Image: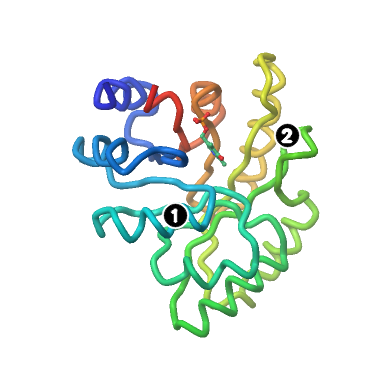
Amino acid sequence: MIAQKIKEIKKVIGSKKLIIVSKNRTFDEILNAYKTGHRDFGENRVQELLKKYEKLPKDIKWHMIGHLQKNKVKYIIPFIHLIHSVDSIELLEKINSVSEKKQIVTNCLIQIKIAQEKSKFGISKSNFDIINNNKNQFSFINIKGIMGMATASLNEEKIKKEFNTLNQIYINSSDFEILCMGMSQDYKIANKCGSNMFRIGSYVFS
Ligand SMILES: *Cc1c(COP(=O)(O)O)cnc(C)c1O
């Protein structure tokens, strides 16, 4: 039961923000979550996101959480609530220029690489510092905070260490409001490490 799963998660995270990750889920599955009153959903592929945006209720707040190709930015800018996965300076520049063209200010998180896997995206701490020191030049982007994914591991200490690294960056960048980390497997650890926004998919729908 989706309602029960959401309730269980909220028992852990309290009033912090839950993004239900709806990638690979059907319209009906998403509507079942929607009917509980939930409005924030995350997708990781532009094509699937566009299909769902068209078909599903317009008061859903869509979050782009997966690697975003620069040539696809233009399709999501008109409606996207928050882009979690800004993983290069070039992508940030692209989002800024497309947003300027459409005269929209786009909300973004900077994805920082904390995991060891080569397959995981994210920028280095030093590139994050460059962005952070130059963020005033991106007039059509509102950088709301940072996002990260821990290594897929059963080693709780390792996950904790990676989340704490991100939390430290968050604490040191005092003008950010969002620290987004934690998925089905590790959201309880992320919660203890200071996360205030969670992206949870499989646990909600299983
Ligand atoms: C799929 C995905 C999630 C959710 O993962 P679950 O294990 O299903 O909770 C979170 N963040 C990103 C970036 C994802 O691609």
- The amino acid sitting under disc 2 is Ala
Of residue 12 and residue 32, the one placed in the foreground of this image is: 32
Residue 39: image tag: none
The residue wearing badge 1 is 49
Q: Residue at x 53, y 51 (%)?
A: 45
Q: Quadrant of the N terminus?
A: top left
Question: Between disc 2 and disc 1, whose residue precedes?
Answer: 1
> Tell me, what colour scheme is on the image?
rainbow
Of residue 92 and residue 53, the one placed in the foreground of this image is: 53
Q: Residue at x 67, y 62 (%)?
A: 132
User: Which SS class for mark 2?
Assistant: loop
The residue wearing badge 2 is 115
Q: Is residue 147 left or right of residue 76?
A: right
Q: Give the answer, above or below, for where 7 lies relative to 25.
A: above
Q: Give the answer, above or below, for where 170 lies relative to 2.
A: below
- The amino acid sitting under disc 1 is Leu
Residue 38, horizontal then vertical, whole percent: 26, 41
Local crowd at mark 1 within 10 Å, few (<14), some, or many (≥20)? many
Residue 79, horizontal then vertical, whole percent: 39, 66
- Quarter-wise, where is residue 31 in the image? top left
